Amino acid sequence: MNGSVPIGKIFGIPLRAHWSVLVLLVLLGYGLGRGTIPALAPGRGTGVYTVAALLGALALLASLLLHESAHAVVARRRGVVVEDMTLWALGGVTRIGRAETPRAMLLISGCGPLASLLLGGIGIGGAVAVRAALGWNVAAAVLFWVGWANLLLAGFNLLPAAPLDGGRIVQAVLWGRTGDRERAERAAGRSGQVVGALLVGLGVISFFRGAANGLWLMLIGFFLSGTAGAEAQRATLSAALRGVPVARAMSAPVVASPEWLTVSRFLEEMESQRRHSGIPLLDFEGRPSGMVTMRQLAMVPGPDRDHVRLRDVATPLSRCTVAAPDEDLVEVLGRAGPAGPLRILVVDGGRLVGIVTAHDISRLTQLLSDRRPVRRDGPR
């Protein structure tokens, strides 16, 4: 996700935080310290409420992290690749590969809400115990709020709308019953569009009635609707490209560059190739070693471009999407994921033989559509 930075690993999985997490932390802390905790535990000073609000906001972020970690851990145990986890203002995102069976998808999708339900029960149960046994009203208020927030999180994620967990569960069930993965994806995507539109409408009504959280509902609704629409389109695309090899879509020959060139020399020599936003790199033996983008080069300060080499700023091959010419295109697209511009390096025998971009996919889809036989009804 653009705008996120790595902050470490959890269970061996890279963890990233989007800048919007700070916004979420401030908003949660303000709401807790000024309204929720004083209402639940009145009679304390501002300093106590401030500390309690900060701890409550951090506890909710930790809950979001545990929710995403549940997805990641179960996915790994089911043999699904986990790229990373990212926390942001609307919760968390775990980038994983495609589940190979409906059962795997069902387990991976259901474990997140289950973790939130467990945390919700622990929070509310802990609040009751702390108040009854120790009389710590402020601590009980924080625990109760965190528990209740986790229950709401679980309920929201169980809505039957992709990309929420509930939408994935619906998709897994439909996939298991029909045996048609793309049809199940389209159904979950359409459901997500409907739920997103309903949330936008509810947010508008709430806002004009004076509820500030109406803006939050509208933001979530727009996000759901847009993401679900993209997933429905991707399912339609997958159905059209199923069984097509990567070689059918790739462009060749490929414009590539030696990895040892300095940034300044590269920009001089590739002046005529500025139409390419990304250029594959080759090592001394002519093997692909990574990909460099014009955006990465633009971030190199002018005075440094004479000694910084392309390999110093490029994305290494280990983080690029690589495929063989005879691989199924849909499976490779699933590995590529939705993040960033599509660039698939096609490698055969250790040599770069082609590249697949979004333009190549669009061109191939149009070609296949034009060749599709037209159904004619009635007498001829």
Image: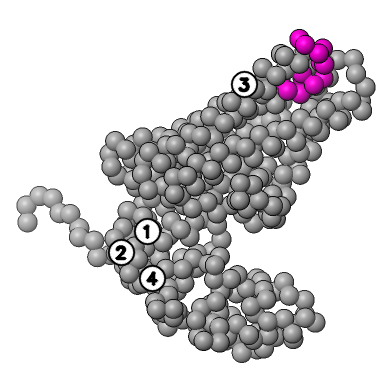
Number of numbered discs overlaid on the protein picture: 4
Q: Nearer the viewer, mark 3 or mark 2?
A: 3
Name the residue located 30 percent from the left edge and 64 percent from the top edge: 244
Quadrant position of the C terminus in the picture: bottom left
Residue matched to label 3: 121
Circle 1/circle 2 CB separation < 8 Å: yes
Circle 3/circle 1 CB separation < 8 Å: no
Secondary element at image label 3 = helix
Residue 318: % across, % down: 54, 67
297 vs 192: above or below: below
Q: For the residue carrying disc 3, how many other residues have a C-alpha within 10 Å: few (<14), some (14-19), or many (20+)?
A: some
Q: How far apart are marks 3 and 1 (CA)?
A: 41 Å
Q: What stretch is highlighted in magenta?
A: 132-145
Going from the N terminus, do you reach mark 3 or mark 4 first? 3
Residue matched to label 4: 324
Q: How far apart are marks 1 and 2 (CA)?
A: 8 Å
Q: For the residue carrying disc 2, how many other residues have a C-alpha within 10 Å: few (<14), some (14-19), or many (20+)?
A: some
Residue matched to label 1: 330
Secondary element at image label 2 = loop
Going from the N terminus, do you reach mark 1 or mark 4 first? 4
Q: Which of marks 1 and 4 is in front?
A: 4
Going from the N terminus, do you reach mark 3 or mark 1 first? 3
Q: Which amino acid does label 3 sit on?
A: Gly
Q: Which amino acid does label 2 sit on?
A: Val
Going from the N terminus, do you reach mark 2 or mark 4 first? 2
Circle 3/circle 4 CB separation < 8 Å: no
Name the residue located 75 percent from the left edge and 42 percent from the top edge: 23
Residue 202: % across, % down: 58, 29
Mark sitting on residue 244: 2
- The quadrant in which residue 43 appears is top right
- The quadrant in which residue 123 appears is top right
Q: Distance between the residues labelled 3 and 4?
A: 49 Å
